[in-house]
Amino acid sequence: MRKFMTKALATAALLAMTAGAQAKETVVWWDFLSGGDGVRMKALLDEFNKTHPDIEIQATTLEWGVPFYTKVQTSAAVGEGPDVMTYHLSRLPLGVDSGVLREISPDELKAAGIEAGNYQPANWKAAQVDGKQYAVPFDIHSVVLYYNKDLLKKAGLLGDDGLPKGLDGLENFDAALQKLKDGGTDYGVSIHSATGDSQWRIFYSLLGQQGGEFLKDGKILDGDNLDKAVNAAAAVAKWTTSGWAPKQVDYPASVALFTSGKAAMHINGVWEVPTMVDLAKQGKLGFEWGAIQLPTLFAQPATWADSHAFAIPNRKGKEISPEKLKAVLAVIKWMNENSLSWATAGHIPAFLPVADSAEFKKMEPNATYSTLAKTAVFDPSSKIAGVASPVYDAAGNYLVPAINGEKDPKEAMTEMQEELQGLLDD
């Protein structure tokens, strides 16, 4: 009898252990995050796994850009790939058009406690295609204006609050650039002038500041939008041809011009905030710095923006189970609720309770430029737009020569319009 009881207890214990093991849901995760973003995401993933005994995230980091999205598409087509992945919102239309992304229904979001009202409105809308939800936003990342407080103060362009003054309006901004050059600064502003992606971000901001629309009703730069595009390209071309900004400068050099004090200002993504913070801490910057929303050079404030987001692949023949979906949405919800540390990479949290928190409001310069979230302009919702897209390629082929004074801005914008319209009409 004792042997029987011992055996029964052992069997029960084994069954309990097996049930416990089965209850733990594994979530396969893919991302494209490297550098500072990668370090911060790894910390979040480790913390989640440490605090959630019922869910284990198994994470893999792949190469950013075309390689990532190509692998996602090919794996989903054969029923393989992750349960959840990072995704740029600007790529959603292409992902939906190619059948890569699974819709997340309103009922599924509601059951997970993910509510639209808790997210930046522009983010949430950009996570939709044709009114259907295909992702949950994680942040807003945009271009901002970095500035050297010492050089701006010397030129009379710094207010008592430590913020730049006199930069709004294209004529005022140009005059400020000339004033900085006259004062002995090599460049008033440093820009990454050699590649299409960086120039697209500046161009799209200035187009938005004129109320322009790059794509409307299936037409590229239709009507007076072409004139507004020419205005945007010509504005930046004047910076380089006047010697206020460097021509044909690659990315590392554009950053170095600012960090070395040779450029008084620098237009770049918020992702360079950690670079400035680290250099300042190490005593290698040599000046006080700050970052603000892009000045309003035309009629209204607008800044190009994109978002890292979380999406679920549409795996052919191997759809996600209800149990796995529940775990995935729990991961997404937790990531947003704990996104304050993610913001230290320069990002603006998409999750409003974090963005509105006292802790984030003390985080500088993020808190200062977070105003741009209200006037952010996301890439056109189109299968030819977004990260590593034909639009970005066209920016490299036409916009870059225009802003470097190698091509007439009107000719360049007309050629870009014609090429991209041809792709849409095919």
Image (spheres, helix red, strand yellow):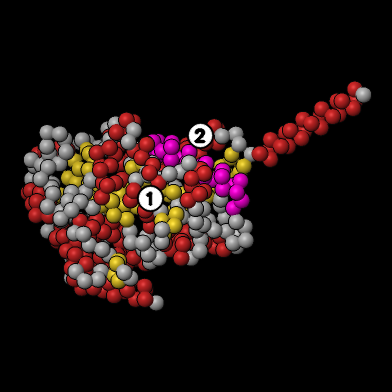
| The residue stretch that appears in magenta | 320-343
Q: Nearer the viewer, mark 1 or mark 2?
A: 1
Element type where label 1 sits in the image: helix
Q: Main secondary structure of the magenta part?
A: helix
Q: Is residue 127 visible?
A: yes
What label sits on residue 47 in the rendered view? 2
Quadrant placement of the N terminus: top right
Image position of 154 with respect to 411: above or below: above
Q: Residue at x 39, y 77 (%)?
A: 426
Q: Quick check: 66 left or right of 315?
A: left
Identify which residue, 114 or 155, lies in the foreground: 114
The quarter of the displayed image where residue 138 is located: top left
What whole-number distance in Å separates the C-alpha atoms at marks 1 and 2? 26 Å
Residue located 47% across and 59% down the image: 69
Which residue is located at x 34 percent, y 48 percent? 121
How many circles with numbers are drawn on the protein? 2
Residue type pointed to by label 1: Trp
- Residue on which the image places disc 1: 124
Q: Looking at the image, can residue 61 be seen?
A: no
Taking 231 as reference, is 273 left or right? right
For label 2, the crowd category at 10 Å Cα-Cα, with few meaning under 14, some 14 to 19 and many 20 or more, is few
Residue at 41% x, 61% y: name it.
130
Quick one: which residue is furthest to the right in this view?
Answer: 1
Along the viewing direction, whichever of 142 and 130 lies nearer the viewer: 130
Residue 89 x, y percent position in the rendering: 40, 54
Q: Residue furthest top?
A: 2
- Measured as percent of width and height from the top left, residue 360 is found at 33, 34
* SS of the residue under disc 2: helix
**In the image, what residue type sits under mark 2?**
Glu
Does the magenta-highlighted stretch encompass residue 338?
yes
